[in-house]
Image (spheres, rainbow, N blue to C red):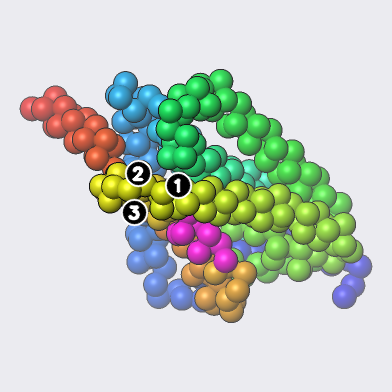
Amino acid sequence: MEAGNQTKFSEFLLLGFSEYPELQPLLFGMFLSMYLVTVFGNLLIILAVTSDSHLHNPMYFFLSNLSFVEICFVTTTVPKMLANIHTQSKGISYIGCLIQIYFVILFGGMDNFLLTVMAYDRFVAICYPLHYTVIMSPQLCGLLVLMSWVIIFWVSLLHTLLMMRLTFCKETEISNFFCDLAQILKVAYSDTLLNNIFVFVTAGLLGVFPLTGILYSYSQIVSSLMRMSSAQSKYKAFSTCGSHLSVVSLFYGSSLGVYFSSSQSSLIATLMYTVVTPMLNPFIYSLRNKDVKGTLGRLLSRAASCGY
């Protein structure tokens, strides 16, 4: 490889779904629809939580934060993918790729942290119901979210700064529809040892520790439920966890699919992780939660009545 073909300011080619040229119009319409549904659905969740005083509690505070993060997460990747499909272009600038990597890690990591905090909230609510309002105070809830933002801000920033020291060939091809850190490191021309070490360390921070926290919380929840004598009490207590469990399963299932699948299957798993999961979250929480469903129903009825 000639030295003249190496640069720190390359343009990357996002191959994505470009090998299906005849499907581009269909893919554009499908992804645009999914993006709009994701943004609209999560905005409805945020509006429902902020407008109804009955939903002003820790569980829905974390849910509204999760909805905000989901909107930001899909906005980081989908608009660029839609622009590339519409213009029949594959390119993304070096700076654009760095920005995309930063925000994908930022919002993906916040997803992880918020799901962990929500599991802790359910753990306290079921295992220590009499102390719930004292333990899960507004100050603690705000502190947990703030700490999550601070941690993931620095993790994302360090990843981006480490990326800036690497060199790449001109028009390097990436077999994805956005700048995925793992794939970028594979095609770097310079040594990536330091980057890979940091990826390994942060994988524990953003993956293993949060998942361990979620599993521990639910093991304690199940243990507490087993000690309840009434089947109705068990069902009522565990029903508050159903939506969260569904979202956690979808999130971690698609995340694991990205790393344990072939290249073509990995593209589909990545799509599930970055686009489908954020789109389904509002449906999961609205359909499985009577409080949210009732508030959304009243909001939509009020909006319909104002239209006439």
Element at label 3:
helix
Element at label 2:
helix
Nearer mark to the viewer, of 1 and 3: 1
x, y (%) of residue 49? 35, 29
Q: Nearer the viewer, residue 233 or 56?
A: 233
x, y (%) of residue 161? 80, 45
Q: Is residue 258 left or right of residue 245?
A: right
Q: CA distance from mark 1 to mark 3?
A: 42 Å
Quadrant of the rendered structure where residue 266 is?
A: bottom right
Residue 134 counted in the magenta span: no
Q: Which mark is residue 224?
A: 1
Whether 61 is drawn above or below 239: the answer is above
Dot 3 alpha-carbon crowd within 10 angstroms: few under 14, some 14 to 19, many 20 or more:
few
x, y (%) of residue 241? 39, 47
Number of labels in the image equals 3
**Magenta highlight: main SS:** helix
Q: Residue furthest right?
A: 3
Give the residue at mark 3: 33
Tag 3: residue type? Answer: Ser
Q: CA distance from mark 3 to mark 2?
A: 36 Å
Quadrant of the rendered structure where residue 240 is?
A: top left
Tag 2: residue type? Answer: Ala
Q: Which residues are magenta?
A: 247-256
Tag 1: residue type? Answer: Ser
Residue drawn at 62 percent across, 69 percent down: 259
Q: Is residue 48 left or right of residue 171?
A: left
Pick whichever of labels 1 and 2 is earlier in the sequence. Answer: 1
Whether 261 is drawn above or below 112: the answer is below
Give the residue at mark 2: 237
